[in-house]
Amino acid sequence: MKVKVDERGYYGNFGGAYIPEMLYPNVEELRENYEQIVGAEEFQQKFNALLKDFVGRPTPLYAAERLSEQYGAKIFLKREDLCHTGAHKVNNTIGQILLAQRLGKQKIIAETGAGQHGVATATVCALMGVECIVYMGEVDMARQRPNVERMRILGAEVRAAKSGSRTLKDATNEAMRHWINNPTDTHYIIGSVVGPHPYPEMVARFQSVISAEIKAQLKEKEGRENPDYVIACVGGGSNAAGAFYHYYDESDVKLIAVEAAGKGNDTGESAATTVLGKPGVLHGSKTLLMQTEDGQVVEPYSISAGLDYPGIGPVHAHLHETGRAQFYSVTDDEAMKAGVQLSRLEGIIPAIETSHALAALNQMNFNADDVVVLNLSGRGDKDLETYIKWGKY
Amino acid sequence: MNRIDQLFQNKQQRVLNVYFTAGYPQLNDTLAIMESLEQSGADLIEVGIPFSDPVADGPTIQESNGIALDNGMTLKLLLEQLAELRKTVSVPVVLMGYINPIVQYGIEAFCKKCAEIGVDGFILPDLPMFEYLETYKPVFDQYGLYNIFLITPQTSEARIREIDDNSHGFIYMVSSASTTGARASISADQSEYFARVKGMNLKNPTLIGFGISNAETFDKACDNANGAIIGSAFIKAISQEGGLKENIETFVKSVIG
């Protein structure tokens, strides 16, 4: 099976560009120009130079020995937590700020959940001297306060999204409304593989550096490019898309996507879209969506602000529908325990989003010679308050 | 003949289309609002299907959507409320809404019901033309329902032509780059855009919406199009103290004179 976006922006049955006419010229401008801009040698040189010298790439592929011992497989951690700003998100914002400059846009807007994408956007805007406004749900601003202040130190304006559930979904609504009201001079840096075509594919391409590096690094360490498993957490799904990208069509590699089950999938407080969602349209694409029978979007719940989203990227809906990826879901408590476990076993405090991927290891059965790559998408500094509040360490 | 065509055959100027959110201010106000609108002189009624995430709408309509949903409005209930619509309302009626609730209801079932009730068309801001032509148009056509497209100051001339070719009923001219209800007056830039579109001699009638709130902006819009659409200002008017019917009469009179 080939996983590829078609001309209309669809991965199988999911994707497209369901946008109001007010956004059509912006999205069309992007669609018409981005491949040419991103494909140009000058762009690639600049992008790669910044990834190397500013972000600190390549990030290590670390053989986690004590974790491997625990689960009886050879587990490698792809250390995206060591990226500048603390997560993989910056790979995409570097790409999009270079793109925005080449489109002649002077202003940047973004949405953020956990604040990692907001920080990564504020960072590249500071780097390029560009005005930056980040929309963030009021609830998320409270639970991710250090990131709010980081964005402000970097010179970005953080605007509270006060509608709906006041989380990532609503921050995205507000960013889209801002773009409708400012269509000519502003570029919207979407932080995940969601939104209207070409965003999902564009963001995945910027993040695909993750799996490109895994291939090269695994070849060097293990003499093979392909692991038996690639595991990543999925909110919108950008780190997973990046980690899966060059393995989509490698059928010997099992792709494992891990969603947040909040307090449990049967409690009404979960964000596990593939379990609880059905096909629907939100934020510009047709995808799996948590919603009522009437088609109203349901407020998701997860302890992790970065996974607290009622949909998933259309590519993941496609991977789910076709069975190319297996989906697991992990509760708040399981994730928190896995985060503490990694801290104790390997000396790495992971982001709570990433802890969901780690917790899925408990649900899997490995052979002793299985090679497993887990995308360690972010570090836990921003989550200290949540760890402290949880308290079981 | 579709009632929208009939309307524009009889009236080419100062056509007033009024939007309201179904289920607001009270769950069961829908038909009463429509009857009062017709009696007060509205030529066309746009009934909003409330949605949890109305990205093209400004604060006023967002709030009315939220309250309508809290009141218990659903698409299914709205269609039940409208079942007897044509006993008391004769002006054309279009349903405005985001596509997801309609997808969940089922496109075919939705169109069948709308045709039975006597709905004349839809305004679906997040349904792109491409998807419409491919999937929706055959069903809409089968039931004689019109899909109304939007154009904005940023829409290219070529795309306006394409939209005109694929439109029935009228074209919804969004007055400025904005969400609903954002602007208070009409600027020179907007006048240039109105004149540009007028000069294109489109096949379809045009109605100007977004930022139309009173007699002054209504008159200005009518100088440049066949009429105008009022939404947020009407929502504000029916949010005030006093009787619903009186508020509607007073508001419509203040706009059309």
Image (cartoon, rainbow, N blue to C red):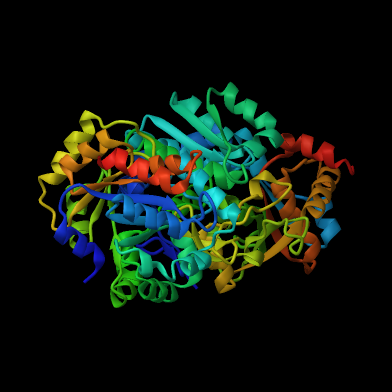
Q: Position of residue A274 (x, y in %)?
A: 63, 65
How many discs appear?
0
Res A151 visible:
yes
Q: Residue furthest right?
A: A393
| Residue A237 location, quadrant | bottom right
Query: Residue A160: x percent and y percent?
Result: 58, 33
Left or right for B121, reference A349: left
Query: Relative to A130, does residue A352 appear above or below in the rendering?
Result: below
Q: Nearer the viewer, residue B110 or A240?
A: B110
> In front here: A301 or A127?
A301
Residue ID at (52%, 58%): B28
Seen at 43% across and 26% down, the residue is: A130
Q: Based on the displayed image, in which of its 4 quarters is residue A361 positioned?
A: bottom right
Q: Quadrant of residue B149?
A: bottom left
Query: From the viewer's perspective, is residue A319 above or below residue B97?
Result: below
The percent position of residue B13, horizontal first and vertical second, equals 16, 49
